Image (cartoon, rainbow, N blue to C red):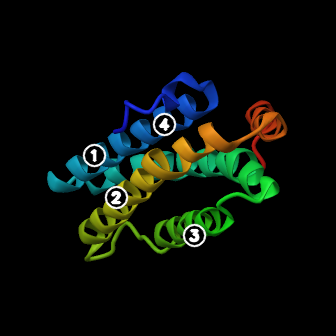
């Protein structure tokens, strides 16, 4: 996890990064349950994971991503990241408790999430800190304060 660029000094970015850590930790818990054969426990945690991921993605897309696109900066990178968000929804919705390959599919999901988080933490977040103007940060603040839409 990147700590040297100063992103954590910007409160909305710090919150998103903290949510990333929480999602990765929850993913680790899910994998530990699966490794011990506790599919029910893993399934319950997967439901929580899906909810937390959905809430995170909603604020990220309505806030930081919207601000970057409105400003005209890094739109291609943002669209790519939004596409990955949609991929997570699809991967999660296709999981089933009785799937013979549940462990492998969860492992794939978590590996994909880890790479995605690196793209955000090491790429788009530092860019946003440097490039967003006051109007962009207003968009981010509005998304932080608004109720979730997903």
Q: Quadrant of the N terminus?
A: top left
Compared across the picture, whether 26 is left or right of 81 comes to left
Residue located at (63% from left, 31% from top): 12
Q: Which mark is residue 80?
A: 3
The numbered dot on residue 17 is 4
In terms of sequence position, does the residue under pointer 2 or pointer 3 come before the other?
3
Q: Residue at x 34, y 58 (%)?
A: 110
Q: Position of residue 33 (x, y in %)?
A: 24, 48
Using the image as rendered, state which of residue 53 and residue 20 is in the foreground: 20
Q: Nearer the viewer, mark 1 or mark 3?
A: 3
Q: Secondary structure at mark 2?
A: helix
Tell me the distance, in whole angstroms, between the alpha carbons under discs 4 and 2: 16 Å
The reply to whether callout 4 and callout 1 are in contact (CB within 8 Å) is no
Q: Quadrant of residue 73?
A: bottom right
Q: Which mark is residue 28?
A: 1
Give the residue number, with chain letter if any, for mark 2.
110
Mark 4 or mark 2: whose residue is earlier in sequence: 4
Q: Are marks 1 and 3 in contact (CB under 8 Å)?
A: no
- Residue 150 in view, yes or no: no
> Separation of disc 4 and disc 1 at Cα?
17 Å
């Amino acid at each position: 996890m990147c700590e040297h660029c100063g992103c954590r000094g910007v409160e909305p970015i710090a919150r998103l990064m903290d949510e990333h850590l929480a999602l990765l930790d929850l993913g680790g818990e899910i994998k530990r349950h699966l490794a011990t054969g506790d599919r029910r426990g893993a399934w319950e945690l997967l439901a929580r994971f899906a909810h937390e991921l959905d809430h995170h993605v909603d604020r990220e897309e309505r806030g930081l991503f919207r601000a970057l696109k409105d400003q005209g900066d890094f739109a291609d990178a943002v669209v790519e990241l939004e596409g990955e968000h949609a991929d997570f929804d699809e991967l999660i919705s296709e999981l089933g408790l009785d799937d013979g390959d549940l462990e492998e599919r969860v492992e794939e999901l978590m590996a994909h999430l880890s790479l995605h988080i690196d793209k955000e933490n090491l790429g788009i977040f530092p860019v946003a800190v440097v490039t967003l103007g006051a109007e962009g940060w207003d968009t981010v603040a509005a998304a932080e304060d608004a109720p979730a839409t997903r």
